[in-house]
Image (spheres, rainbow, N blue to C red):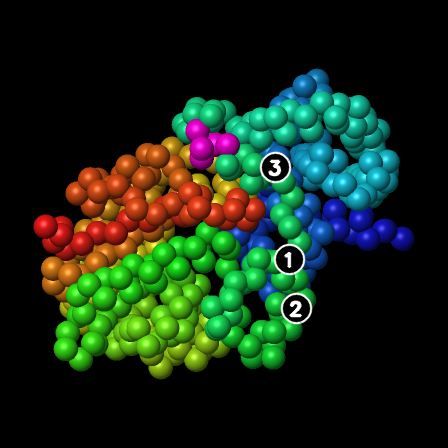
Amino acid sequence: MASNLQESIKTALEFMPEHRLHRKRTWALTLDTLLDDARSQKEVSAGTLDLILMGYRYTHLFQRELGEFLKKPNLEPRELKDLFQVVFAALLTRTKTPISTLVSEAVEVARWQFGAKTAGLSNAFFRGVTRRLEALKDEVELRPQILLGPRLLQRWGENSNAAKKTGQLISLRPEGGLSAFDDKGQFFESISMLDFLAAKTRGEKIQAMDLGSWGFAKWCHGKILKQHQKSPTNSSGAWSLLDACAAPGGKLIAALTLLNIDKNQLTLPEKVIATDAKNSRLSLLRENLEQWKLNELVQVEAISWGEAASSPASSQAIEGRGRIPEHFDWVIADLPCSGLGTLHSRPDIISEDPGKRVDEVKPLQAAIIQELRQRLNDANSILIISVCSVDPQEIANISAQLDGQSPEYSSWENADAKSCEGITAWVFRKTKPQ
Ligand SMILES: C[S@@+](CC[C@H](N)C(=O)[O-])C[C@H]1O[C@@H](n2cnc3c(N)ncnc32)[C@H](O)[C@@H]1O
């Protein structure tokens, strides 16, 4: 009978690149979506998730070591590579499972999953890694940036803050559990998945969120309070807010929660509109708003900002635009982006071409910003733009769309690095203060 560890390794393999390549559904979806799906169906345990994430995070070091080990360029069958990758990372990062157990269990998986002939080769690779284990661990500890691979290191610079911080984040196993906030504005740095799900089932208002996004929501809240103290919007105090790229809604809910807590300083916005281009994500947004009893305050609409009027999807977008006001006091846009500030939670991006990712999102980011700039109300209105990226080129591209303005917020400047997304944000005023 297969042990728990063997079962865990087998489940992890289904999420790895070669396995996904041969299954139509899994290849079409991103790792992020697959994991979200699996988590909601409780298909992956915390241990399996760890095997998957660490397997992806150590991709570049694994490829180097595999290249040195193999005489032929490819493994047969190709899916065996996934087993090597998962177990390589586990050998380097697991502290509680004895190395000999890990190796023998992994060899058993090779035997049953890929045929008896693969057991010898697997054993040889894992034993080779075991012999070099201390040297490999020292290398990662000394220079965690090597995990980013040559393309990112060349792009960001070996000793840049982005490279060092990302390297540190992806080299360490994530703490167990997840971080979240509640309706009292409390942030929990680590709560177990079981406690989190139990609280949700009891109908408590609790939302999973990483420290970087929470820091961003607090920063937005501070900006809103300060601006309203300086120049209240109108005599009734009514003000409007558009979250243009809102789904699934974590940051909007966090900002509204914080505003709700200090109601005595500022009333909640009279009108809040939340839009997103993707229907599947809009459903998640609606569910989340309902759970937080914010569905009456927040009007949700499907709108693809920056989309040319002639584009095929535009009829829905035109209808959506017709249902919302022309102008707002505050517009927030958490733009679709390269994701290069989230490599620890989306480590499959590590093996992609970062330049291509940034170039691909650039036109859409520019078009969204240009359209949203037109949606600001008056001279006091403010547009907040954010991206989950620390890529200097992506940041420069966005600054160029905001008349050369530099970002005012970086989640990595103040926060503790443990599980903090790299978020960069700008504040853009319709008219610059004199
Ligand atoms: C970074 S995510 C937003 C996360 C969200 N702010 C939160 O805190 O949960 C970017 C979102 O932009 C949406 N999006 C992509 N293109 C868009 C467009 N043209 N107009 C509006 N939303 C768009 C995506 O569907 C995605 O939900």
What amino acid type is highlighted by mark number 3? Answer: Ser
Which portion, as a residue range, is magenta?
160-164
In this figure, which residue is indicated by the disc labeled 3? 171
- Kind of element beneath mark 2: helix
Q: Which residue is drawn at 51% across and 37% down?
A: 166
Q: Residue at x 43, y 25 (%)?
A: 157
Task: Give residue 177's mark.
Answer: 1
Q: Which of 377/128 is in front?
A: 377
User: Would you call the spot at circle 3 few (<14 residues within 10 Å), some (14-19), or many (20 or more)?
Assistant: many
Provide the major secondary structure of the magenta segment: helix
In this figure, which residue is indicated by the disc labeled 2? 195
Mark 1 and mark 2 in contact (Cβ < 8 Å)? Answer: yes
C-alpha separation, residue under disc 2 versus residue under disc 1: 9 Å
**Who comes first in sequence, dot 3 or dot 2?**
3
Q: Residue at x 40, y 40 (%)?
A: 390
Judge whether residue 283 can be spotted in this image. Answer: no
Mark 2 and mark 3 in contact (Cβ < 8 Å)? Answer: no
- Kind of element beneath mark 3: helix
Q: On the image, which quarter does residue 85 sit in?
A: top right
In the image, is residue 162 part of the stretch drawn in magenta? Answer: yes
What amino acid type is highlighted by mark number 2? Answer: Asp
Q: Is label 3's Cβ within 8 Å of ligand 1?
A: no
